[in-house]
Image: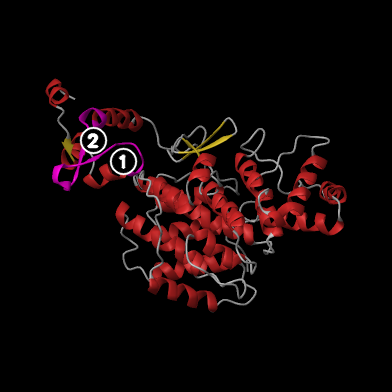
Amino acid sequence: MTTEERTAGVRLSTREAAERLGVKPETVYAYVSRGLLGSRRAPGGRGSTFDPGEVDALARRNRRAAQQPPVDDATGAVRTAITLIDGDRHYFRGVDATALAERYGYEEVAEWLWTGVLRRGVRFTAPPQALAAARRAVAALPGHSGPMDRLRAIAVAAAVEDPLRFDLSPEAVLGAARGLIPTLVRALPAAGTAHQGEGGPARLLWSRLTARPADEASLRVLDAALVLLIDHDLAASTLAVRIAASARAHPYAVVSAGLGALDGPLHGAASGLAHRMLAEVLDRGSAAAVVADHLRAGGPVPGLGHRLYRAEDPRAVMLLRLLEDVPYAERALAAAREVAATTARHAPAHPNVDLALAVLSVSSGMAPEAGETVFAVARTAGWIAHALEEYEEPPLRMRPSGHYVGPRPPQPLPAP
């Protein structure tokens, strides 16, 4: 920034900022959406202007970052500005995730995570043609299909209905995301004859998970869960998403990659195991025998502990506190606490977010897979955030080399 610019308060146009940064104008707006650069509307409301000092500082940071590999070969770490887990706290772009869940709804946080702009009351809308195609795809599945089967079918159907899906500009990706998330929810079959209602994703999703009428305390828990589950470091599904985005897969394919990885019993389905355990505790009237059965089988007790937290999972702490305001959750909440207390007799055992989801699903008459559905819908917003970030990186950078351990050539041809 020159002395003349500082004295005169000169601001840069988008084109000038792009030239100083050595990027395309579209990338300048991507920096703004990621919170890396501030902007102001130009006089007359046409275009944006940027502070020269801030642009120059970002250019210096970019030059330093360019000297480092985007993937640390020593640790396998991937640079990201989305989520930080530090000191048993969980942050989105440096902001405490539980504070965001206390104050804002899922769509508001998702929009802010993508663009850097908080839009109060924002609502995403399912494109009618995509929604109709997704419902037809779900209806064609076998009756025994699970929620992840349906969500994958919905994502594929929505992709086919979007001829612009191969446009990977930030604006096009955001447009696809704002349509895909409500399509994922609305295309799921209703759980009963209860009024499906309008409103945000929590209210709409509720009617797909249980026939019980929604109450505000329960919806508050569900909406907070959606916010808290948006992202959580580089989980298996998120890594799959980053690899797909690195290959420049379109956003629907990126989400499909995430759904595929999420379908494993050690990832998204973990809350179902906690649900079945809590249901058994309530049925048998005591946690001791159920905990003993799990330990005797040589496995961990579902819903307890997390490899990224030394002590309590902050997401579980918040959700379990909110569940105290749900009257019919009292028994399931007591059962969860008894499980934790029983297991902690010999080793520290703190509830994780899967146990909190299980309290909600058991007490609300939901199926064991309900927590998995909540997880998948919530995490879609985080996957899109990671895709937007990865689209700004060099393509195909996530290409590890295989370490061959098979027979050394030459080997004879196999006999019939």
Q: Residues within 10 Å of mark 2 (few under 14, many from 20)?
A: many
Assign a secondary structure to mark 1.
Answer: helix
Give whichever of discs 1 and 2 has the lower sequence position: 2
Q: Are marks 1 and 2 in contact (CB under 8 Å)?
A: yes
Q: Position of residue 392 (x, y in %)?
A: 34, 45
For the C terminus, the image quarter is bottom right
> For residue 31, which numbered disc appears in the image?
1
Q: Quadrant of residue 85?
A: top right
Q: Quadrant of residue 23?
A: top left
139 over 203 or under it: above or below = below
- The segment highlighted magenta reads 33-55
Q: Amino acid at mark 2?
A: Leu
For the N terminus, the image quarter is top left
Say which residue appears at 63% left-offset and 47% top-offset. Answer: 322
Q: CA distance from mark 1 to mark 2?
A: 11 Å
- Residue 37 within the segment the image draws in magenta: yes
Looking at the image, residue 6 sits to the left or right of residue 172; the answer is left
Residue behind mark 2: 21
Q: Residues within 10 Å of mark 1 (few under 14, many from 20)?
A: some
Q: Amino acid at mark 1?
A: Tyr
Viewer can see residue 262:
no
Assign a secondary structure to mark 2.
Answer: helix
Say which residue appears at 48% left-offset and 78% top-offset. Answer: 136
Looking at the image, residue 290 sits to the left or right of residue 244; the answer is right
Looking at the image, residue 55 sits to the left or right of residue 231; the answer is left
Camera-side residue of 241 and 186:
186
- Residue 340 within the segment the image draws in magenta: no
